[in-house]
């Protein structure tokens, strides 16, 4: 290996051999990093999908609770009408501007 390397450097020159060595090293590093990162990207993708599913579930539960509250308000209003009681007026709040 020693004589071959020396002959290659003498034939092509040190700058060319150094550039080829640097390119080979860069190639190895890039693919090593990409191999490790591809697994991490898959893990992050799975986490994002789970978070989106959880967010959608919370949105569905919030909408369900909003519908139930609206239904209860209607039922309370009907109950007040049946009893002949006027419903309480909402308290007016001053808004800060």
Image (tube, rainbow, N blue to C red):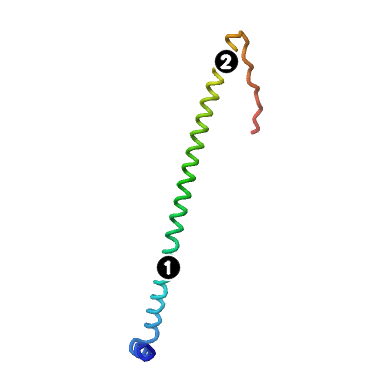
> What residue do we see at 45% from left, 50% from top?
46
Q: Earlier in the sequence, mark 2 or mark 1?
A: 1
Instruction: Tell me whether the residue at label 2 lies in contact with that at label 1, contact meaning CB atoms closer than 8 angstroms.
Output: no
In the displayed structure, 22 sits above or below 85; it is below
- Give residue 2's position: percent from left, percent from top: 39, 90
Comparing 34 with 87, the one in front is 34
- Give residue 42's position: percent from left, percent from top: 43, 55
In the displayed structure, 61 sits above or below 3; it is above
> What residue do we see at 47% from left, 48% from top?
48
> What residue do we see at 34% from left, 87% from top?
8
In the displayed structure, 20 sits above or below 36; it is below
Q: Residue lying farthest left?
A: 11
The residue indicated by pointer 1 is: 32
- Give residue 86's position: percent from left, percent from top: 62, 12
Comparing 19 with 97, the one in front is 19
Query: Where is the N terminus found, in terms of image quarters?
Result: bottom left
The answer to whether residue 58 is left or right of residue 30 is right
In the displayed structure, 13 sits above or below 86; it is below
Q: Residues within 10 Å of mark 1 (few under 14, many from 20)?
A: few
Comparing 26 with 31, the one in front is 31
Secondary structure at badge 1 equals helix
Secondary structure at badge 2 equals helix
| Quarter location, residue 75 | top right
> What residue do we see at 64% from left, 16% from top?
88
Query: Where is the C terminus found, in terms of image quarters?
Result: top right
Give the mark toward the camera: 2 or 1. 1
Residue 77's disc is 2
Q: Residues within 10 Å of mark 2 (few under 14, many from 20)?
A: some
Q: Count up the numbered dots.
A: 2
- Give residue 52's position: percent from left, percent from top: 47, 43
Q: CA distance from mark 2 to mark 1?
A: 68 Å
The answer to whether residue 56 is left or right of residue 84 is left
């Amino acid at each position: 290996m020693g004589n071959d390397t020396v002959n290659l450097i003498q034939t092509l020159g040190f700058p060319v051999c150094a550039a080829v060595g640097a390119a080979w090293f860069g190639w190895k590093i890039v693919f090593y990093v990409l191999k490790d990162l591809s697994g991490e990207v898959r893990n992050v993708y799975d986490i994002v999908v789970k978070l989106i599913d959880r967010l959608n579930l919370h949105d569905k539960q919030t909408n369900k609770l909003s519908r139930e509250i609206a239904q209860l308000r209607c039922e309370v209003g009907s109950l007040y009408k049946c009893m002949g009681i006027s419903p309480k007026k909402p308290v007016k709040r001053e808004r800060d501007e």
